[in-house]
Image (cartoon, grey):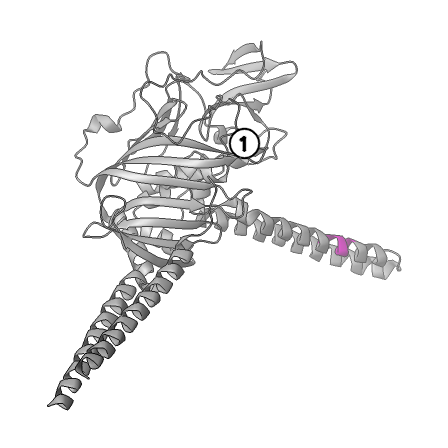
């Protein structure tokens, strides 16, 4: 009888230990998913964004610049982006020094207006949002951070660039459950927090430029995602304000000494 | 005897529990180390830099490789020149052969330049989000950028007064409107206002037509 009791006690103890170990193992599995899962999550975010036909989002961003003294300065900006595929885009920006500007693409022209300088630039750009983003950023040399995320082929753009990606953890610290990933391209290290759920939208992104002096970062937090904004047509129409002057895009000017000779900005969709 | 058995059982459970906790902590720490990549620590300040682009590619990381490629290319050109110089001391037939070689070499160089341009184009296609606003700014031809203001990490305020427009390229420029473009003359240097990567700037330009 005593021997049977002892056996029962030992069995119970081992079962308890096994349950504790199993729980710990499952938790560890959750915290350290395989790299393929991390990549799938990243690409899934790109696919979801690329397939979304209409969206609006507010992006609060900050980036570092390293001064000659070696000190870093953080610059802040808020952008509200409204996108209606295939050929409508509006981006309103406010920088931390109060500068306000707007970029409007109506399917025929891309326009950008600087409120404080009362100047605008305009370029003919027939085509879709994809070609226009490439033209605006690459050929006209204009700033539009995270533009890669808003082309319809965002998934393939990310896949082509990203060399490694790992799963860090699942977190709710940003207000909603999210997968925290880290990764790197050839020249940029990144972290991204992607919503856990049926809408894998980015909640936060941090980009680090490790080869640049001081390893500056770009940080962005996304809020007010709206995947059915139903924007009015007027939102994508640019009418130059009174007394505003039209100036050329700097990149479209013929290059002049001391810069090397070069061709003016060209149209171009990429692959 | 029974109490000793219970003690042993509890001790075993406790030991495994502690072991499990230590294992999880170790995993968490490894995960934390992976996630904890060291990043950046953190009137008249520069607001230009690689991080301003918010791109998934950066010229900062590729500049060294491109420079090395250029240097290597230059080294090969120098070696070819040395060989050509040595061959120049030979006879007439040899000169003819040299001429033929020079022609072939020129062809190869042209092909090389073309191939390099193609590679550059392919690179720009693949990394289009880098932009080239910074490259334009780096030429030194851009002046009169709106003055930056140092800010804290706090969100911007709607009450923030708008900054002044882009400063003129010099204190008292001569303005010459030609064909819808206003040229600014500072001494013998001419500027035109243009829309740069982050707003209006003055860009050094050729003199206006007819001046």
- Residue found at x 54% / y 34%: A71
Left or right, residue B71 beside residue A214 = right
Vertical side of A171 occupied by A27: above or below: below
Residue B73 picture location, percent across and down: 67, 53
- Write down the residue under mark 1: B137
Label 1 CA crowd tier, 10 Å (few <14, some 14–19, many 20+): some
Q: Chain of mark 1?
A: B
Picture quadrant of residue A118: top left
Residue extent of the magenta highlight: B77-81
The answer to whether residue A217 of the structure is visible from this angle is: yes
| Residue positioned most to the left | A1
Left or right, residue A5 beside residue A54 = left
- Residue found at x 26% / y 67%: A24
Left or right, residue B178 beside residue A127 = right
Residue A141 picture location, percent across and down: 46, 35
Q: Is residue A82 magenta?
A: no
Vertical side of A254 occupied by B41: above or below: below
Residue B115 picture location, percent across and down: 57, 53
Near-viewer residue (B77 or A171): A171
Picture quadrant of residue A62: top left
Vertical side of A107 occupied by B90: above or below: below
Near-viewer residue (A24 or A102): A24
- Residue found at x 51% / y 48%: A210
Near-viewer residue (A92 or B45): B45
């Amino acid at each position: 009888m005593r021997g049977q009791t002892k056996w029962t006690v030992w069995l119970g103890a081992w079962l308890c230990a096994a349950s504790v170990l199993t729980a710990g193992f499952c938790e560890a599995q959750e915290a350290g998913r395989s790299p393929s899962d991390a990549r799938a999550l990243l690409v899934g975010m790109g696919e979801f964004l690329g397939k979304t036909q209409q969206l609006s989002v507010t992006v609060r961003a900050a980036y570092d610049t390293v001064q000659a003294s070696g000190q870093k300065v953080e610059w802040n900006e808020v952008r509200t982006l409204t996108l209606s595929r295939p050929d409508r885009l509006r981006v309103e920006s406010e920088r931390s020094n109060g500068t306000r500007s707007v970029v409007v693409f109506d399917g025929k022209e891309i326009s950008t207006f600087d409120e404080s300088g009362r100047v605008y630039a305009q370029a003919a750009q027939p085509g879709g949002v994809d070609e226009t983003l490439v033209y605006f950023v690459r050929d006209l040399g204009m700033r539009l951070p995270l533009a890669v995320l808003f082309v319809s082929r965002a998934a393939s753009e990310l896949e082509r660039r990203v060399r490694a990606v790992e799963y860090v953890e699942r977190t709710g610290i940003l207000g909603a459950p999210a997968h925290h990933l880290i990764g790197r391209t050839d020249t940029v290290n990144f972290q991204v927090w992607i919503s856990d759920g049926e809408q894998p939208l980015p909640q936060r992104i941090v980009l680090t430029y490790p080869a640049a002096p001081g390893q500056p970062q770009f940080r962005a937090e996304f809020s007010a995602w709206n995947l059915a904004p139903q924007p009015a047509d007027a939102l994508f129409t640019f009418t130059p304000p009174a007394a505003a002057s039209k100036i050329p895009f700097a990149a479209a000017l013929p290059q002049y000494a001391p810069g090397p000779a070069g061709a003016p900005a060209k149209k171009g969709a990429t692959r | 005897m029974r109490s000793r058995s219970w003690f042993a059982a509890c001790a075993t459970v406790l030991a495994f529990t502690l072991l499990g906790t230590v294992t999880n902590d170790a995993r968490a720490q490894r995960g934390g180390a992976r996630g904890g990549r060291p990043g950046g620590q953190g009137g008249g300040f520069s607001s230009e830099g690689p991080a301003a682009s918010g791109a998934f590619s950066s010229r900062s990381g590729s500049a060294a490789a491109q420079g090395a490629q250029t240097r290597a290319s230059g080294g090969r050109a120098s070696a070819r020149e040395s060989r050509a110089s040595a061959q120049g001391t030979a006879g007439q037939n040899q000169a003819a052969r040299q001429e033929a070689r020079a022609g072939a070499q020129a062809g190869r160089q042209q092909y090389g330049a073309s191939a390099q341009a193609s590679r550059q184009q392919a690179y720009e296609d693949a990394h289009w989000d880098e932009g080239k606003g910074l490259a334009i700014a780096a030429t030194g031809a851009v002046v009169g950028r709106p003055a930056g203001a140092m800010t804290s990490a706090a969100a911007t305020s709607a009450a923030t007064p708008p900054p002044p427009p882009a400063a003129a390229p010099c204190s008292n420029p001569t303005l010459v409107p030609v064909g819808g473009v206003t040229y600014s003359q500072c001494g013998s240097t001419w500027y035109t206002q243009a829309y740069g990567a982050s707003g209006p700037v003055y860009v050094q330009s050729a003199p206006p037509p007819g001046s």
